[in-house]
Image: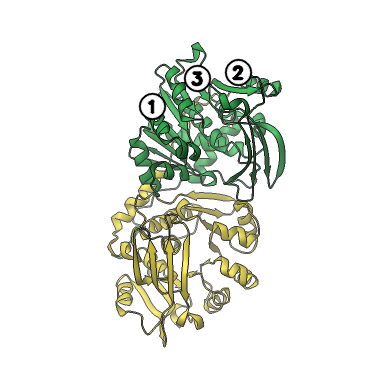
Chain colours: A yellow, B green
Amino acid sequence: MPVLVVGSVALDSVETPFGKREEILGGSATYFSMAASFFTPVRVVAVVGEDFPDSHLSMLSSRGVDLSGLVRQPGRTFRWKGRYTHQLNDAQTLDTQLNVFEHFEPKLPEPWRSTPYVFLGNIDPNLQSKVLDQAQRPTLVAADTMNFWIRGKLEDLKQTLRRVDLLFVNDAEARELAAEPNVVRAVRKIMAMGPKVVAVKRGEYGALLFQGDTVFSAPAYPLADVYDPTGAGDSFAGGFMGYLSTCSEPTKVNVRRATIMGSVMASFAVEGFSLDRFKSLTEPEIFERFRAFRALTHFEDLAAGTLRAVS
Amino acid sequence: MPVLVVGSVALDSVETPFGKREEILGGSATYFSMAASFFTPVRVVAVVGEDFPDSHLSMLSSRGVDLSGLVRQPGRTFRWKGRYTHQLNDAQTLDTQLNVFEHFEPKLPEPWRSTPYVFLGNIDPNLQSKVLDQAQRPTLVAADTMNFWIRGKLEDLKQTLRRVDLLFVNDAEARELAAEPNVVRAVRKIMAMGPKVVAVKRGEYGALLFQGDTVFSAPAYPLADVYDPTGAGDSFAGGFMGYLSTCSEPTKVNVRRATIMGSVMASFAVEGFSLDRFKSLTEPEIFERFRAFRALTHFEDLAAGTLRAVS
């Protein structure tokens, strides 16, 4: 089933302990759609400026990403500049230039209004709501958000969350959104705001997936070489949603697999700058890493009689 | 098989967002031996002062903990005072009084020298070596350490590590010990120092277990109520070693189960102040939480044909 994503398409300048890149392809919609494209057709609603290279667009198109909803407007493309120290979990934002993104008004092309899977990238919650106003009874609505909106537009965000089935959120942001320091309790409060499923992203520590009264823990893949953490969260969401859209139902079994597939795609995203690793990524590599996650996390039950407590 | 532990027995004063306790039972050897006691006989080598309450000793004895190696010396017992904010992962040490612990010289009672499983709690690496000088061909030697020794006694620590099979270490400390920011690479360097198995403890994010060329990831149990994180790491080591000592061999299958059992015991430790939760803990509860870790981490393999990559 096709997945529609609304979010940013950006030119990033990134510095990590492993190198420095200027004006490389980035943005939440970009990482999301590239990761999801390995599983399903993706439809992108976004905006770029006159300076955005055509080569990026043709690269995405070649992956089966439909860019009919990407508009090019007068002005410059959204730019983000950031730096990571060896503590790769936290990006230090050096500069943000909204440019054409500042007056972004997402419009869904008419034939896309009935797209069954919708992902609202991390944009103004008002815009997220406007996207949902244009959508016709989607099967599943997922959203991402961040502390900027939690602090600045909490009421608007809560309006959006009532219409969201699945929320992707960092652990610190989950705590902040719920005003509750314990993650388990924070998620319960967030579920009361609307989402039936909450994916708590924890960077290098993986993710916790809450669905109803069950929790699933997915680690991040332990990599010896993490070149650039940018886009890991959106690649996680892309792998998750891309995989889930191929399933007949978001059952607990399928949501667990989707969580792992999100972790798989995030692990590839950080192995290179920008979307570089995805460009060479193959289906067998995805399968192999999915299996590697089983090897990483699974263990045998206790043999009968081995546990002999004193009491 | 019996497990011998050398470490601190302390009186802690702890403040968390959930309450404040003065002069409660604490110390690395205490948490370790209590957690391990659910699986195997435990032998404690430690020192307390004249002020140490007899009731604590009889509580430990009643759990099958042999205190023949615990000496009482003139002076006051080791004291630690700490505070946790809502960010429960990091303790803020307010006061440390070594007292009788300052001149602690661990002596193994003669019949204990051939104890097959040895755990060297987080003490001066010189003392850890002196314990090993007294041990006779133990089956498995495990050790814990901390940044204080990594910074102050690195060469002594490296001497000890040559004789250690299994190292328990925090992730930040692993990075510091190896002078390498990436955990996977740091562990490779630590393995070159001696330990064949390295358990990287990550607090509320669980643990990574490296053995040979394989990695196993164990989450921490997501709890809605964490009252006091003190002793979680030592309870993890206690559950790990206690369980492992009941296995015929430290195979990869058994080491994975031991890692989970460590996480199980750590999850109980933090549910109360001091050792309170352990006092009421039953065998069925341990079994049940072990199984809950499978429910938390396991997932189904991909169904055939569900992954259809574009490329």
Question: Residue B175 in the image: x percent, y percent?
Answer: 42, 45
Q: Are marks 1 and 3 on the same chain?
A: yes
B197 or B307: nearer the viewer: B197
In this picture, is A48 found above or below A230?
below
Q: Earlier in the sequence, mark 1 or mark 3?
A: 3
User: Quick one: SS at disc 2?
Assistant: strand
Q: Does B277 sit left or right of A50 as displayed?
A: right
A226 or B71: nearer the viewer: B71
Question: Residue A272 in the image: x percent, y percent?
Answer: 33, 61
Q: Which residue is mark 1?
A: B163
Q: Which residue is mark 3?
A: B2
Label 2 crowd (10 A; few <14 / some 14-19 / many >=20): some
B132 or A42: nearer the viewer: B132
Chain of residue at mark 1: B
Q: Is residue A115 visible?
A: no
Q: Does A227 sit left or right of B2 as displayed?
A: left
Q: Earlier in the sequence, mark 1 or mark 2?
A: 2
Q: Are marks 2 and 3 on the same chain?
A: yes
Which numbered marker is on residue B71? 2
Q: Residue at x 47, y 74 (%)?
A: A96
Question: Residue B205 in the image: x percent, y percent?
Answer: 51, 47
> Disc 1 residue type?
Arg
In this picture, is A192 found above or below B79?
below
Q: Residue at x 39, y 18 (%)?
A: B137
Q: Residue at x 45, y 17 (%)?
A: B134
Instruction: For marks 2 and 3, give the one nearer the viewer.
Output: 2
> Disc 3 residue type?
Pro
In this picture, is B70 found above or below A143?
above
